[in-house]
Image (cartoon, rainbow, N blue to C red):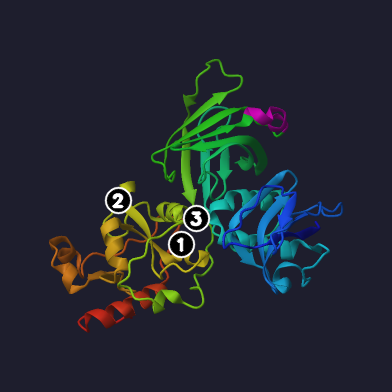
Amino acid sequence: MKHAIRYLGFLHDETPDLEPFPKSYTKKDRSTESVDPRPDDVDGILFGYLQKAPDEFVAVAAEYRDFHVTVSHPVLLVPAKHTDGKGFGPQMSRFGDESAGRLLSDIISANPDRSAELLQIAEWTDLLLSTVSRDELRLTWKKSDAKGYTDVFKHGEFDSDCESRPRAHTVEGPHDFVAKAYYRLSVADRSAVLDYSAFAEKNRAEGMHPGKLSIQFTDSDRHEIAQVLWQGEEDEFPEPAPVDIVASWQGGAEEEYIPPEPNEAVQKKLTQVAPRTGQAAFRRTLLRTYGSCVLTSCSVGAAIEAAHIDEFVNAQSDNPRNGLMLRKDLHALFDAGLMAIHPGSGTVYFAPDARMDREYGSMHGSSGLRPPKAGFEARAPSRAALNRRWRLFVERHGAHLPEQT
């Protein structure tokens, strides 16, 4: 395939504000110009970029056919990596699959909240992505005509609220059967509805029955399934009925966590507890990885939070190996430098002031870090990140603590 990247204007704010399929762009002087149309020879992804500085350009959009995704976290463009070494100017730069795959991977990593849509573009274009965290939700049917078949949904498919969004997922079955199922997706609160009837003819051609699948989750984080309902287009009863399905989350391969440079996480004082924003995708990833607080097993959604080991600097900090699910009070102590986890043993220790509380005193030196759930072992906390936290904790709270090893 041939891919290209086109100019969409000047980045006036840190967060770009672009319309889908933009017809015009804003220049540095705030005047407007028409956006160049898609070239006839580009049959792959048409990326969009903004100018941030005289020699600095950032990717902010990806478009394929009638599907357009804009992102809130721009990705700095490196020609040698992203565009076959081609620069940026009046003419659109064209490049091949390898560069397009690297660029799309970097956009996904910086924008986990849009990963489902971006992974869909990757699937349609058969791009080979760099290592990206890709949870899979697998629904295996145990009865009916679909017995033995598994619906496979990619990372982030149900993370964002949406209404009637066109989607597709893989279906795996006996005798190496693999096909695509097409549907319109609506997600809100604790429910996801997949309307396969919207693409009835296409699905029948793939050997599947049209209908509506309703997935009911246990909470609005949508990390655990309570019930699955099916209403076939040709079923005798008009109401959806529960179906016997085995649901399982599987964690994809994880890239090694490397702290952002400069590593502000170890330079800032831990006495400062900063509010966090944009944590929804990070939280969902850690909920699937651990399911509950890693120290107390508390699983009440309103009582647990996603904590960064190295303090948050940018999207790179949201690698799950830089995260722990902690009960809210423990998260606050962890961020304040009043609690740390030994990088070798996984044992939790508290500062003297915190140990005056009976519960924290009983946990000190005895409670241990629970590992990730089966299938998510690759997301075990980064020992290097725990080491950095531990060093700061020991510096502040004395030498009567174990060594790092």
| Circle number at residue 280 | none
Predominant secondary structure, magenta span: helix
Name the element at disc 2: helix
Image location of residue 311, percent across then percent down: 41, 69
Residue 331, visible in the rendered structure: yes
Q: Of marks 2 and 1, which one's residue comes earlier in the chain?
A: 2
- Judging by the rendered image, the residue that carries numbered circle 3 is 251
- The mark lying in front, picked from 1 and 3, is 1
Q: Residue at x 74, y 54 (%)?
A: 45
Question: Please, what is the three-letter code of the amino acid marked with disc 1?
Answer: Pro
Q: Position of residue 141 (x, y in %)?
A: 52, 35
User: Mark 1 — residue?
Assistant: 320
* Identity, as a three-letter code, of the amino acid under mark 2: Ala
Total numbered labels: 3
Q: Residues within 10 Å of mark 1 (few under 14, many from 20)?
A: many
What x and y, as percent, mark residue 224? 42, 43
Q: Which of 224 and 114 is in front in this view?
A: 114
Quadrant location of the C terminus in the rendered image: bottom left
Vertical comparison of 179 with 89: above or below: above
Name the residue beneath numbered marker 2.
303
Quarter the N terminus occupies? bottom right
